[in-house]
Amino acid sequence: MITYRSSSLVSGAYRVLALARRADRSRGHLRGWLPGSAALVLTALTATSLAAQDIYLDSLGHDYGSPDAAVQVVELSDFGCHYCQKFHLESFPTVFQEYIESGKVRWKYVTFVSGMFPNSKEASVLAECVGEQGLFDQIRDRLFEAQQEWKRSDDVQALLLAYAVEVGADVEQVERCLAAGRGDETVSQGTRFGFLAGARGTPTFLVDGFPMMGALPLDFIREVLDRRLEAAAEDEVRQR
């Protein structure tokens, strides 16, 4: 059975320790998303079914950084969430520059719908359809920038399609994707993964599998990533 080692309070912040790298897939637990692995598999028993379910994370989300990075982060983010907006507009550019572009961290963004915010499902589905044209980053940023506008809109679909045009998407391709249900299926899979992984709020970050939730200050995120990088380096030395 997989185990999470506890986090301990160190210098006023929680230190994220290593996630055990193996799981007994006969029970519902998380197997580590490791560099070079074929997939992260989440096998879980849901409240409505006794059958185990596998979700392959490699087929979900949007990836940034080197696949060989020492630390892997999965972000579960809801477009309607104010704290997700705040993180992406204020903190993520720095995280991207310091940790992702530098090759230290592999980051996966998974669209997650918590069900708490108006029009969030529609925005999420639209984003995934625009993402098929290689414009996910652009539509993600536009949706976060205009969050209050589309959350309050009475004609959200028209407004969302206007955003798609703004970022350079072919609106006819977007509409075909929407009609075919591809965006909806992608969002549903990401949301199911999030709930099975234990996300109960947004944003949720899985740092080498260890969950952190909420509006985390940039300095806290830096400390978590730095400590996890230190632990990964120590693990590599011990394995030599």
Image (cartoon, grey):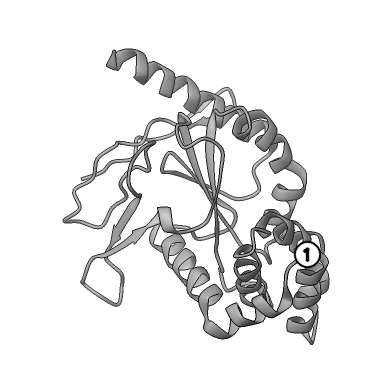
Residue at 66 percent across and 36 percent down: it is 95
| Residue plotted at (55% across, 64% down) | 112
Q: Secondary structure at mark 1?
A: loop
Q: Residue furthest left?
A: 26
Q: Which residue is mark 1?
A: 168
The spot of residue 83 in percent (x, y) is: 69, 54
- Residue at (66% x, 59% y) in the render: 136
Q: Is residue 193 above or below residue 226?
A: below
Residue 36 left/right relative to 171:
left
Label 1 is placed on what type of residue? Gly
Horizontal side of 128 relative to 189 (left or right) equals: right
Residue 238 pos. (x, y %): 30, 14
Give coordinates of residue 99: x percent, y percent. Answer: 61, 30
- Quarter of the image for the C terminus: give it: top left
- Near mark 1 (Cα within 10 A), the count class, few <14, some 14-19 or many ≥20, is few
In this picture, is 17 found above or below 208? Answer: above
Q: Nearer the viewer, residue 133 or 153?
A: 133
Quadrant of res 90 = top right
Q: Quadrant of the N terminus?
A: top left
In this picture, is 151 found above or below 39?
A: below
Image quadrant in which you'd find residue 3: top left
